[in-house]
Amino acid sequence: MARIGGANTHATLNAAFTELAMPPASDEGTKNERIEGSFAQVPDSDLHTMAKRILAAGQATAAERMGIEDLIWAESSPPEIPKRVRREVARALDLEHMTPSETRFMAMLTRFWVLGGELSPLLESFFGGSGPSLRTNIEQHVFRNPGDWSAEELFEYLGAFEAGDARFARFLEAMVSADVLLDEPAQRRLVETINQRVRSAAVELRETGTEDG
């Protein structure tokens, strides 16, 4: 919440609070004190709405966004997908068949995982980066040198085996979507490969509708 202060003046703070479903704050005190005062007045019943507005406003880092999403998604009581099943899925997948488009696949990964690499390698080095980002490694070992990594290794580096059930399920759905795979037969083959493994957890991927045909 402290970032609201950096993005606003005293005069615009209350408008920023309104956008995030926070109550107005007293005009007295520092910006941080006003932010703390407003946040303290948010009832628990409004935290869900506030969290969704923070996500919509893009005011969270990738790690913060994931944390907020996990809290929101957990409310829907997603089906449990055990780690054993997740590994069976990963071992059955062929990365080459999943990644016909680097741009689309990387955009999907960025949506669900913290990849880093938003800065150029020079800036990463300047600001004390601790080596290549996960994004850089994926680009290197999945796309530049196909075969370096298996799907299981990719899942491991992403943190997919430890992720919440809702995030993992949404990740599977995204992998087989038309946003990643443009070829319908390829989508259906990948769905069947996944379903053969996840049915043991009493879940499966199903086609529930179409977008733009």
Image (tube, grey):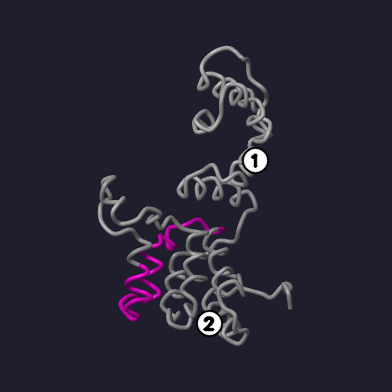
Residue at the (67%, 35%) spot, across then down: 19
Label 1 Cα crowd, 10 Å radius (few <14 / some 14-19 / many 20+): some
Q: Is residue 156 magenta?
A: yes
Horizontal relation, residue 118 to residue 186: left or right: left
Residue lying furthest top = 28
Q: Nearer the viewer, residue 1 or 6?
A: 6
Q: Position of residue 75 (x, y in %)?
A: 63, 48
Q: In which quarter of the image is residue 145?
A: bottom left
Q: In this view, does 75 lie above or below 145?
A: above
Q: In this view, does 7 lie above or below 173?
A: above
Q: Does the magenta stretch include residue 112?
A: no
Mark carried by residue 193: 2
What amino acid type is highlighted by mark number 2? Thr
Q: Total of numbered circles in the picture?
A: 2
**Mark 1, mark 2: which one is toward the viewer?**
1
Mark carried by residue 48: 1
Residue at the (57%, 75%) spot, across then down: 176
Q: Nearer the viewer, residue 183 or 153?
A: 183
Q: Position of residue 94 (x, y in %)?
A: 43, 82
Q: Position of residue 111 (x, y in %)?
A: 52, 59
Span highlighted in magenta in the image: 138-166
What amino acid type is highlighted by mark number 1? His
